[in-house]
Image (cartoon, rainbow, N blue to C red):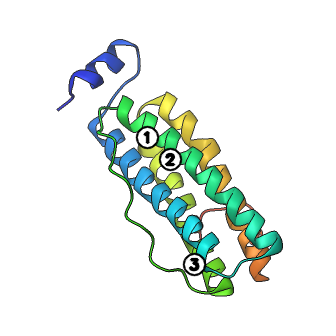
Amino acid sequence: MIDRRGLLLAAAGAPVRPGDRELIGALLRRARRLEALYAAGLDEADLTGEPRHLVATFRNQCADHVDELTFVYVRLGGRPPSDASPAPKPPRRRAFLRLAARREAAAVRGCLEALPEIHNERVRRRLGPIMASHAQHLALLRELIGDDPIPFAFEQGRVR
């Protein structure tokens, strides 16, 4: 059932389907977990130099994704989620980078799977840059780990 906000969006020319809100909600939860992971990694994962700088940048970009997805989620009639629970203590440097790469791959995969299912064109346009950002994070994390940063012509969030 579409609520009052959904009707307002539909009246403004933006098709709203109940599944759009659920898909954005799932992406929002994933983005919040990534942001929390990066914040915890800065505190606990023994990162220095370039890895620390990149993780701080990724945390800030994930915070931007959270803001963007929260805005979209609320516009689609969702209630803003409460604060994310704190991330568990991350493993040390190399294991942390591998964990972050797996989570970024899942974020790319989540966006890629959600895009064709979302009916609202404005929402789809907002997801493209977020997916590209996660793919960039994934390539840089792979490089830090010592893996091929771009093992596929088109990133689909696969993990070896």
Badge 1: residue crowd in 10 Å (few <14, some 14–19, many ≥20): many
> Can you tell which mark lies on residue 70?
1
Contact, mark 2 vs mark 1 (Cβ under 8 Å): yes
Report the disc number at residue 92.
none
Q: Is residue 147 above or below residue 68?
A: below
Using the image, determine if residue 73 lies above or below residue 101: above
Q: Which residue is mark 3?
A: 99
Q: Amino acid at mark 2?
A: Val
Is 115 drawn above or below residue 46 in the view shown? above
Please name the residue that numbered disc 2 is placed on.
Answer: 66
Q: Is residue 10 left or right of residue 41?
A: left
Name the residue nearer the viewer: 107 or 29: 29
Q: Can residue 148 be seen from the camera position used here?
A: no
- In the structure shown, which secondary structural element does the residue marked by tag 1 occupy? helix
- Give the residue type at disc 3: Leu
Type of amino acid at the residue the image marks with label 1: Thr
Q: Can you tell which quarter of the image residue 44 is in?
A: bottom right
Closer-to-camera residue (75/105): 75
From where the camera sits, is residue 121 visible? yes
Q: Position of residue 81 (x, y in %)?
A: 33, 47
Residue 80 pos. (x, y %): 34, 41
Q: Quadrant of residue 126?
A: top right
The mark nearer the N terminus, 3 or 1, is: 1
Kindly indicate whether the residue at mark 1 contacts the one at mark 3 (C-beta within 8 angstroms): no
Residue farthest toward the top in the current orientation of the protein: 11
Front residue (pair 86, 75): 86
Q: What's the distance in space between the residues labelled 2 and 1, CA to CA?
A: 6 Å
Residue located at (39% from left, 58% from top): 84
Report how far apart the C-alphas of labels 3 and 1 lie in the structure.
Answer: 24 Å
